[in-house]
Image: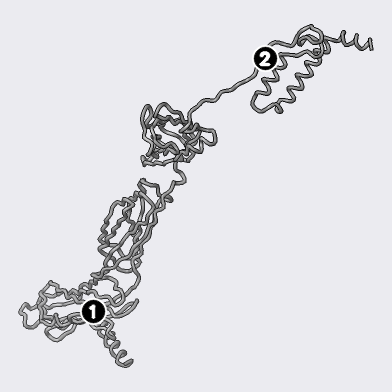
Amino acid sequence: MKLNYLLTSCILLVLMVSVVPVSADTNRNDGGSSYVYVSSVTMNPETFYPYETGSVSVTLTNDGNTSVGVTHPNLLAANNEISIVNQDKWQTLSYLGSSNSITYTFDVTVNGMDGNYFSLFSIETKDGKNIHYPITFEVDSEDLHAAISSRPETFTIDSAASVNLSLINPRDGALKSIYITTADSGTDITPSVTFISEIPANSVTEVPFTVTPHKATNITFNINYQNGDVKRELSVNLPITPGNAKDAAVPTINNMALTSSGSTYDLSGDITNTGVTDANGVVVSVGLPAKGTGTYPEYAVGSLASDDSSSFEVTFTCTDLSSVPLVIHWKDSAGTDYSVTKTVDLTTYSQSGGMPSASTTGSSTRTSGSFSGAPSGTGGPGGDMSGGPGGSSSSSSSVLSSITSAKGGLSSFYPVIAMFALIIVGAVAYTKRKWIMSKIKKQ
């Protein structure tokens, strides 16, 4: 077997280095000479996959001034590395006229893995001469590569974003008829179908898409392509997890207050842009089950720069005031629409005292004791405040009654009571000093 392979290879080598000019056909009476040569070789595909079937076209050109008869074109290869399909279809004699060309196309299969495979094109002329031309077939098992080369850091619900799909052809031959299809029920994708006629050898092609997600999902890009007449396919997945971009506007609601008038409620508060970029065209409204009505069914805040704030007020009706969805719409500098819904838990506000309960109405009152005038009088014992011991002071009783009735209980006012008691005792002692001194002297 090795001897046969060696002999075949030697014969091919000798034939490949020989170039045989074709002399004039003696049956033609044009008196000139002719010269036939291989002017071009075309392969489809340019680079084969292992054991793939394709075609090779060989063109002969006659530069002479007389016609030449040619027959039995063939491809020779060592060890059956190149197989020819329908080999006997070129057995007839053909005349190649002066300055004319003829093309022979062979359907072939390359029987091998990655590498270069050599063959020899051979054709006979009518006068028994042979023309030989070497042909090399390249085999490569490397496939087309596809990857997401550009995408936003974060996708935003209902906002358009740009996505780039890179198609990389690492092969030495072009890939053709590339179809890219996408379909996803939770996302709008433009374009939904893309066609590329060819990706050249060793090159990258960028395919842009516009993606508008409506929910969290996975987008699949299905890619179909051809290497020659053989169809192949691959796919690329793009996970979509919506969120807010790092530089997006972030509306924050606080300092809310709720009032009611009949069946209509009024919710007011402050809105602040705590994000990095500006929020344009900010509008505040309520969502279901609440329904905007009255003076402010929607409140146009306008533009909010970063760290800027403004007030808002919305009026609405609602059958269940346990919570109210507050909907905020705005646009970025590119005009992209954004929206966020913040659910206001009214029961929490009611329990904490920050907002009146939706099912309770009432008022709070404040009661305070008061007194006027200063303690005075000149009476003796048994008399009023100006009398002696055993008397009473209506003013001090009023003060104590007022203090003890105040919120917080008597104990919280002990220092005040003690102060007033000392003042009263001092005043009485000063007023009755002569009487007290006389009593002491008698003793």
Q: Residue 121: give x, y in percent of width and height.
A: 22, 80
Q: Which residue is mark 2?
A: 371
Nearest to the observer: residue 365 or residue 217: 365
Q: Residues within 10 Å of mark 1 (few under 14, many from 20)?
A: some
Q: Nearer the viewer, mark 1 or mark 2?
A: 2
Residue found at x 33% / y 52%: 186
Q: Secondary structure at mark 1?
A: strand
Q: Residue 4: give x, y in percent of width and height.
A: 29, 92
Which disc, if any, is residue 133? Answer: 1
Q: Residues within 10 Å of mark 2 (few under 14, many from 20)?
A: few
Location of residue 363 with respect to 158 vertically, above or below: above
- Labelled pair 1, 2 in contact (Cβ < 8 Å): no
Location of residue 216 with respect to 47 vertically, above or below: above
Query: Mark 2 belongs to which amino acid?
Result: Phe
The count of marks equals 2
Location of residue 380 with respect to 342 vertically, above or below: above
Colouring used for the render: one colour
Query: Mark 1 belongs to which amino acid?
Result: Tyr
Q: Residue 318: give x, y in percent of width and height.
A: 39, 35
Among the 4 quarters of the image, the one containing residue 145: bottom left
Q: Is residue 439 left or right of residue 236?
A: right
